[in-house]
Image (cartoon, rainbow, N blue to C red):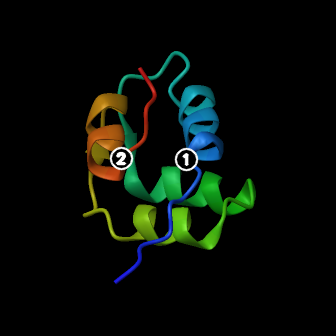
Amino acid sequence: MVTEEVDTRPLDELLDDLYHGQERISQVDIYRRAVAAELPAQLLSRLNALPQGEYAVDEVTDLLGGSVG
């Protein structure tokens, strides 16, 4: 089974922008901004799979495999 490696840079950039001056953001708001930013379908699927709730940036990156720090 081969898994395709997804480029998370667009997600990292989006999260950098979203979390600038924010401590926690809801899954719905993150997903809405990702759709507006036209992130790849693989990344949108990952965001959509997050449970509803608010997340700190480190929680989101841990769950999604991103690298924002």
Circle 2 sits on which residue?
65
Q: Amino acid at mark 2?
A: Gly
Q: Is residue 19 left or right of residue 7?
A: left
Q: Quadrant of the N terminus?
A: bottom left
- Position in image of residue 41 (x %, y %): 61, 72
Q: Which mark is residue 50?
A: none
Q: Nearer the viewer, residue 4 or 52?
A: 4
Residue 52 horizontal side relative to residue 41, left or right:
left
Dot 1 crowding, Cα within 10 Å, few <14, some 14–19, many 20+: some
SS under mark 2:
loop
* Marks 2 and 1, the one that precedes in the sequence: 1
Q: Marks 1 and 2: in contact by CB < 8 Å? A: yes
Point out residue 32 in the picture as x, y percentages from the top left corner: 59, 59
Name the residue: 55% across, 47% down.
Answer: 8
Q: Residue furthest bottom?
A: 1
Tell me if residue 40 comes above or below residue 15 in the rendering.
below
Q: 10 Å neighbourhood of mark 2: few (<14), some, or many (≥20)?
A: some
Looking at the rendered structure, the secondary structure element under dot 1 is loop
- When the figure is inspected, residue 13 is found, relative to residue 34, above or below; the finding is above
Q: Is residue 16 above or below residue 47?
A: above
The residue identified by callout 1 is 8
Q: Quadrant of residue 69?
A: top left
